[in-house]
Amino acid sequence: MGRPRTPLLDRERITTTALQLIDETGDFSVPQVARRLGAQTGSVYHHVEGRDGIVELLRERVCAAIDPGTLELTPWDTALEAWARSYRAAFAAHPRVIPLLMTSPVRAPRVLEQYECAVSLLLEAGFERAGIMPLIIALENLVLGSALDLAAPEAMWELTDSVPTPHLAQALAAVGEGRADRAFEVGLTAFMNHARALREDG
Amino acid sequence: MGRPRTPLLDRERITTTALQLIDETGDFSVPQVARRLGAQTGSVYHHVEGRDGIVELLRERVCAAIDPGTLELTPWDTALEAWARSYRAAFAAHPRVIPLLMTSPVRAPRVLEQYECAVSLLLEAGFERAGIMPLIIALENLVLGSALDLAAPEAMWELTDSVPTPHLAQALAAVGEGRADRAFEVGLTAFMNHARALREDG
């Protein structure tokens, strides 16, 4: 007649624990997840389809923070730009998961649906079919590179008297605060201008 | 009177070992490096300034593969584009080191010198001083995002009948081989066009 028990293991808790491990150490293993949850490694495998299954749960978890409504905005370029900003913010919250997710095949159903929406947006906007995935991947490279950069120190260049770098010193002094955000704006503006030009040529 | 001995430890061997560990596991620790070299952890610290010192040796090692002659080409846009291509190739050889180097401050002398060259190139080309670092960082985000993407599987999206994604399927089929390279070209073209436009406005 005790209080209702929280289940020791479920997919949510496994995902949360794996994400904590990655945030802290840059990686995770199934035995580490089991140990943190006070469970046997074999028990974890009863809930997920191996390590790859956890990777896809992580992808769904992180991508759930991307606002799907962005892709329904009009016109198409407003939608694409808003999606890129929301995408960057979602991954900036967990930058250490980026290399793992960028190098594992995408299987998570809700994430595949999000790609379907992005492709449909660009098809409807009139983009040539063969150019759509290169365009989306180029945007992702910019977004994920920038999200990783948000995890860098604000003072990223430590100059020293032993190496004369007067122009670098002046350029750094001229930027002021928020260099990561300013760089993202430059990259996103470049990308959006190019996408608009590509569509007009098509 | 034996044969000349190869020293058990030197900075070159420590760097090579740390890079191998990162290529294999995504990270390294000083005790792991010591173990692989058959040395005590304390002995490694006699050769390098701690873990951070090894990170900077790794940065010098990976960046040594960037052709410094690219930044001396003319005109400036030919130089910048060639530098970006060489930069991507250097990091594509060691994609798992990217998150580590992107999130640690740059101290390596030869790498600081390379930034000095890049900044000088853009100053001489007539760019406004405050915009130069955002421009360089935007290019790095694109380059490093694309280098990480080169480590992804060619078949990055695994579609399934349970999630209808007809437009994504068609868009993927239309890309053909080399999606990572095509995406990099899109991003680089966008960036270079924007950089040229910024300079003309300045």
Image (cartoon, coloured by chain):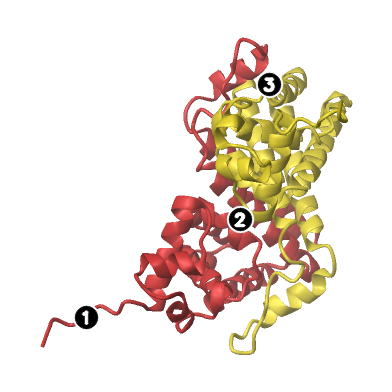
Chain colours: A red, B yellow
Q: Give the secondary structure at mark 3.
A: helix
As drawn, the label of residue A33 is: none
User: A115 and A6: which one is in front?
Assistant: A6
As drawn, the label of residue A99 is: 2
Q: CA distance from mark 2 to mark 1?
A: 36 Å
Q: Residue at x 18, y 82 (%)?
A: A4
Amino acid marked by disc 1 = Arg
Marks 2 & 1 on one chain = yes
Above or below: residue B197 compared with residue A12:
above
* Placement of the C terminus of chain B among the 4 image quadrants: top right
Q: CA distance from mark 3 to mark 1?
A: 58 Å
As drawn, the label of residue B109 is: 3
Q: Is residue A9 left or right of residue B156?
A: left
Q: CA distance from mark 2 to mark 3?
A: 27 Å
Q: Nearer the viewer, mark 2 or mark 1?
A: 1
Above or below: residue A40 compared with residue A75:
below
**The disc numbered 2 marks a residue on which chain?**
A
